[in-house]
Amino acid sequence: MKKLSILGSTGSIGRQCLSVVEALPERFAIVALAAGGNLDELAGQIARHRPELVSVADAAKAGELEAKLRAAGVSPLPAIHHGAEGLMAVATHGAADIVVSAAVGVVGLPATYAAVKLGKTVALSNKEVLVAAGELVMAAARHAGQELLPVDSEHNAVHQCLRGGVRGEVRRLVLTASGGPFRKTPLASLSSVTPEQALAHPNWRMGNRISIDSATMMNKGFEVIEARWLFGVRPDQIDVLLHPQSTVHSMVEFVDGSVLAQLGPTDMRMPIQYALTYPQRVASNQLALDWSKLKRLDFAKVSTRRFPCLRLAREAMKKGGALPCALNAADEIAVAAFLERRLPFLGIPEVIERVLARTPKIKFSAMEDVLAADVEARRMAKEEVSKLGATAAVAG
């Protein structure tokens, strides 16, 4: 039986991970959970899985959680930690065989890095880990002799396809993108897009930030950067194609012209289960592609005029150093401002581009460098949001 720690257990990926665990109780047990402030969800998870250790956002939440568990009659209580120390305790729990990194944001980066250095098997869903610190994290994984197992459907698909050949036979990776809700929206209409429209993804149910990143296609830009580190390919070996059905999750083209594609339903439990059970495959929770509903598969090139964030991500990847970290930080600030209606939709790539232009190209030698660059990029992004917001107010 494999024992799991989950960073971000109350988020979308965390909840679906626990669903997979519950469907395969003979294979998995939970030893530690980390969450933020959703104490009702976390308390239910603790009651079902009885972890030894849990972590929440801060000391106040820790006290509130303890009271909630006592009132519910949960006994014995798990050890309750909080903050950065709590995340680290969950990620480095001595009994954990697998650490699922699904915390949202850079908050989960140091803890995931620590798990990698310890030689834990890491099932990776947190994009920030490789976008902000890919070189450091992959060097630690190589030193520990461990492979990072991708949970994102696109990288998970590539991982599966690569089992059909060896790395030297790969010509290119092809990541697919749904195009989000604005694939066909007239360009002139994008300036007036509302948060509600941007959050309405046609295929996937996701958290707010990743839904907006899908609408701008920044999520695909992040995935290109992640793929470069995960699979050790050159930037020019990674392509992106629009595929509105989200049925082909990604493809690998080999040097002889053969293409392997991974198809599956739009259900994250499938790639999560693959990562948790790798290298085995086990019977799924009745997850299957409904071929009767699959009438066509469409593919098209991506317009960087419509999706400038993809261009910005590629530029940051090619320049390297602190720029991918700044890309992620600026995007997070800009997306939050858009959701709070302080920034127009097209202001998101504008803020990111301005921050990248102000970011020096420095090489990271330690995780502290990454975190410092993240803080500085956020500071600059907030400045640029204020400037653009003021400009929009004057124009209005």
Image: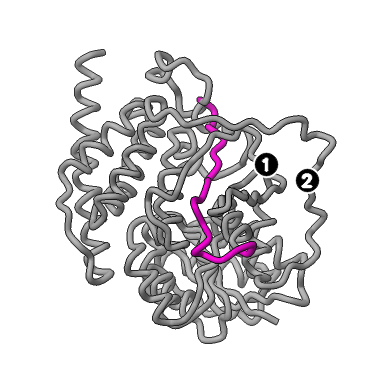
Tell me where residue 276 appears, x and y as whole percent.
64, 69
Which amino acid type corresponds to the residue marked 2 in the rendered image?
Leu
**Image quadrant for the C terminus?**
top left
Residue 247 is tagged as 1
Residue at x 46% of width, y 36% of height: 212
Report, in whole angstroms, how far the alpha carbon at label 2 lies from the one at label 1.
8 Å
Q: Residue furthest right?
A: 292
Determine whether, in the image, residue 266 is placed left or right of residue 208: right
Say which of 20 and 45 sits in front: 20
Question: Within 10 angstroms of label 2, few (less than 14), some, or many (20 or more) residues?
Answer: some
Against 100, is 310 above or below?
above
Tell me where residue 148 appears, x and y as whole percent.
50, 69
Tell me where residue 69 appears, x and y as whole percent.
61, 69
Secondary structure category for the residue under label 1 = loop
Examine the structure image and report whether residue 262 is included in the region drawn in magenta: no
Which residues are drawn in magenta?
163-182
Q: Earlier in the sequence, mark 2 or mark 1?
A: 1
Residue at x 41% of width, y 25% of height: 306
Determine whether, in the image, residue 217 is placed left or right of residue 282: left
Residue at x 47% of width, y 66% of height: 56
Q: Quadrant of residue 14?
A: bottom right
Determine whether, in the image, residue 287 is placed left or right of residue 333: right
Residue 289 is tagged as 2
Against 6, is 394 above or below?
above
